[in-house]
Image (cartoon, helix red, strand yellow):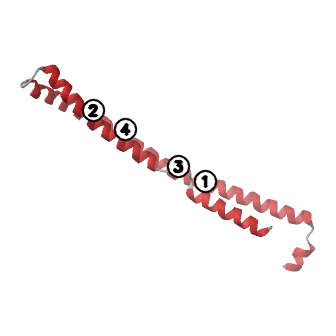
Amino acid sequence: MERHREEQSLGELFGEFTAEMRTLVRDEVDLAKAEMSGKMTHLKKDITYLAVGGLIAYAGLLGLVAFFIIILGDAMPLWASALIVSIVVGGIGYFFVQKGISDLKSRTLVPQQTVETLKEDRQWLKERK
């Protein structure tokens, strides 16, 4: 094998190197696509759960809001009971929205595996020089 390498011309070696680099880049792109596809699937699922849960909770919340406004309306003016219930419900809603945003922000969309293999490839290229 060594003897064969010595007999190869510079053009042939460069051609092999170019072909290997093309294959490497193609493989890295395929890996990035696969990794991002998996991440997007999870992200879509999380957003769907967030939306569906929010809609269902909203329907239930409307009934509870009306209930509490009516109950408190017996002890105070109706406008005051509506204001108090709205503030409490708004605070609870704010908490859940912040929780959803925090969970979405904690997910990274960077294809970590691809980044790692690109670093390894760069190191491999440095060593071949």
The answer to whether residue 105 is left or right of residue 119 is left
Q: CA distance from mark 3 to mark 2?
A: 31 Å
Callout 4 amino acid: Ala
Residue picked out by circle 1: 32
Callout 1 amino acid: Ala
**In which quadrant is the N terminus drawn?**
bottom right
Residue picked out by circle 3: 109
Q: Earlier in the sequence, mark 2 or mark 1?
A: 1
Q: Tell which residue pokes out farthest to the left in this image.
A: 75
Q: CA distance from mark 2 to mark 1?
A: 41 Å
Which element is circle 4 on?
helix
**In which quadrant is the C terminus drawn?**
bottom right
Residue picked out by circle 4: 51
Say which quarter of the image contains residue 94.
Answer: top left
Q: Which mark is residue 59?
A: none
Q: Which mark is residue 90?
A: 2
Residue drawn at point x = 71 percent, y = 56 percent: 25
Say which quarter of the image contains residue 78.
Answer: top left
The answer to whether residue 111 is left or right of residue 59 is right
Between residues 62 and 119, which one lies in front from this camera angle? 119
Residue 2 locus on image (x, y percent): 85, 79
